[in-house]
Amino acid sequence: MKRKLADIAAMAGGQLGNPGDADVLIEGVTTDSRRISPGCLFIPLAGERFDGHDFAKDCLQAGAGAVLWSKSRGEAPGPCVLVDDTLEALQRLAKHYLAASHARVVGITGSNGKTTTKDLLFSLLATTFKVHKTQGNYNNHIGLPLTVLSMPEDTEIAVLEMGMSGRHEIELLSKLAEPEAAIVTNIGEAHLLQLGSRLEIARAKLEILSGLREGGLFVYNGDEPLITQVLEEPATAKPANLKLSTFGIAPDNADYPVGIMHLEDKTVFTSHALGDTPLELPLPGEHNVVNALAALTVARYFGVAAPALAEGLKRVELTGMRIETVRGVSGITILNDAYNASPASVKAAIGVLEKKRGYRQKVAVLGDMLELGEDEVEYHREVGRFLDPGKTDLLFTYGKLGAAIAEGAAERLDNERIFSYQDKNELIDALISRLHPQDVLLVKASRGMKLEEVVDAVKSSSLHR
Ligand SMILES: CC(=O)N[C@H]1[C@@H](OP(=O)(O)OP(=O)(O)OC[C@H]2O[C@@H](n3ccc(=O)[nH]c3=O)[C@H](O)[C@@H]2O)O[C@H](CO)[C@@H](O)[C@@H]1O[C@H](C)C(=O)N[C@@H](C)C(=O)N[C@H](CCC(=O)N[C@@H](CCC[C@@H](N)C(=O)O)C(=O)O)C(=O)O
Ligand SMILES: Nc1ncnc2c1ncn2[C@@H]1O[C@H](COP(=O)(O)OP(=O)(O)OP(=O)(O)O)[C@@H](O)[C@H]1O
Ligand SMILES: C[C@@H](N)C(=O)N[C@H](C)C(=O)O
């Protein structure tokens, strides 16, 4: 974004601290003093550990062109726009920047698959359009506005991931972005702690309709009855002339896989809507075929031609740690699925592991799934029971809730194949002592467990004793 400070004041709903700064040219926005670029606008936010206002003077000395400044903080340290609340001003600035652009907007939410579907849709649309997408997981009330403000002025389509862990968070993001197409990937169990039930999770996700434009397209997982239920609730805000399209495994969806072939380094499937052309997806798992169907539906809506759809799927570049295949120095195959975890995604990952063929051992390292609420222990036991003793050879668990995975697994797996740890280094040592270069290893737990540390240790181990 490149604007004069006076225009930024108007877009952000603030006032120039000094009218003489009206023509200060601003290029780019940051909320982090550790990432200042020449002429940028620094937006100080108050967080759990720091207040960005304390860094504003340093930012200006480091080359920032101006700062947003809360009126309650007294005199600003240099060129500024005075606002009541810097976070609200960031969101307002992003809303106005997006509205003034010619970019068409897609919003993506759901319990699992937001980032994957965002990356898939980006790859499909980029065959035909100039597309901007959420980087990494920047999907909340701060990340989405920053994503919008980093969007090039000539963007044709913006693909925005919308995350939540409470009610009305998606509503805020959708009303900011005003998408013309919206995807809900699925309704899982993530953030049950805050929402209390899967029905409430569904209601939170369908808040994406509250900002959807009139005549907009809603693409959703038709296999999930809660979505249909909430869609029909009178309290669910939705635009006039809403277009609907479903995707999923069941053949009563508008699009579903007619056939799926799971290969070592890709998944080949045919989509009902696209006819007989086999489509190659360089990702594993039935769940990623479902994500691809959602992305294909929206890409077709924007007019991407069939040959480009097939090419776009092949080219997808998935954000890391989402069932990412990694090779260790020993030759071991690691399925790095350590970014996050909830029951639905862990079961999907186990499904990928158990379809693997030609390995000496198939080993799973599973850790705590956080924010699941009062039934968290039973959810972990249920995941343990999901492991097929004929298809997973060893189970290592990490964390207090991970121990409940082990309890559930023990109902089907022999005890000598199950190992539970509370200390990550002890887990790593024991795991490495049992692994062989010809093994395949799945690593998965919630973000807070940081199991990428296990991936890194195994990846760099020669595994020779
Ligand atoms: C507010 C912020 O951006 N904090 C980031 C900062 O955290 P840090 O611990 O350093 O300090 P504070 O938060 O207290 O900092 C306050 C501000 O001060 C700035 N600052 C600090 C130090 C300094 O020397 N100079 C400074 O200028 C600082 O930049 C703050 O603006 O840094 C951390 C490390 O880089 C960041 O992780 C932290 O970011 C927070 C978590 C954040 O929300 N960042 C967004 C841009 C974002 O989108 N992050 C995503 C993860 C989003 C997510 O969790 N999504 C959920 C669903 C949504 C849940 C919702 N309820 C929610 O609240 O998030 C999901 O399930 O996907 C990402 O990091 O990938
Ligand atoms: N449709 C799906 N059903 C179940 N699990 C899925 C699905 N799509 C992706 N996953 C798994 O869920 C985890 C997170 O994937 P991804 O990051 O794409 O989702 P997300 O919704 O962005 O997650 P988060 O909310 O944690 O950021 C990964 O383990 C991935 O393999
Ligand atoms: C990324 C964050 N919103 C999240 O999903 N947290 C999980 C539950 C965690 O903390 O591991």
Image (cartoon, rainbow, N blue to C red):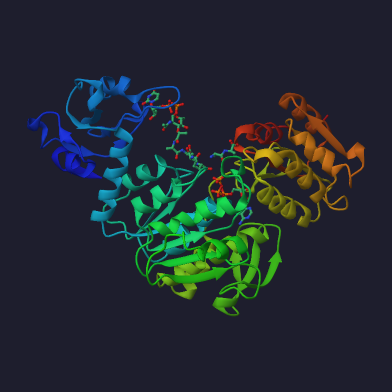
> In the image, is residue 59 above or below residue 105?
above
Q: Which quarter of the rendered image does ligand 3 occupy?
A: top right
Q: Quadrant of residue 314?
A: bottom right
What's the residue at 77%, 55% (across, down)?
356
Q: In this view, does 158 lie to the left or right of 312?
A: left
Q: In which quarter of the image is residue 270?
A: bottom right
User: Is residue 440 or residue 372 the one in the foreground?
Assistant: 372
Residue 464 makes an appearance in the image: no
Picture coordinates of residue 286 (x, y %)?
Answer: 67, 61
User: Is residue 445 or residue 205 the one in the foreground?
Assistant: 205
> In the image, is residue 263 above or below residue 40?
below
Which corner quadrant holds the C terminus? top right
Total numbered badges shown on the rendered structure = 0
Q: Quadrant of residue 452?
A: top right
Q: Which residue lies furthest to the left in this view?
A: 20
Which corner quadrant holds the N terminus? top left
Q: Is residue 106 left or right of residue 273?
A: left
Picture coordinates of residue 405 (x, y %)?
Answer: 78, 40
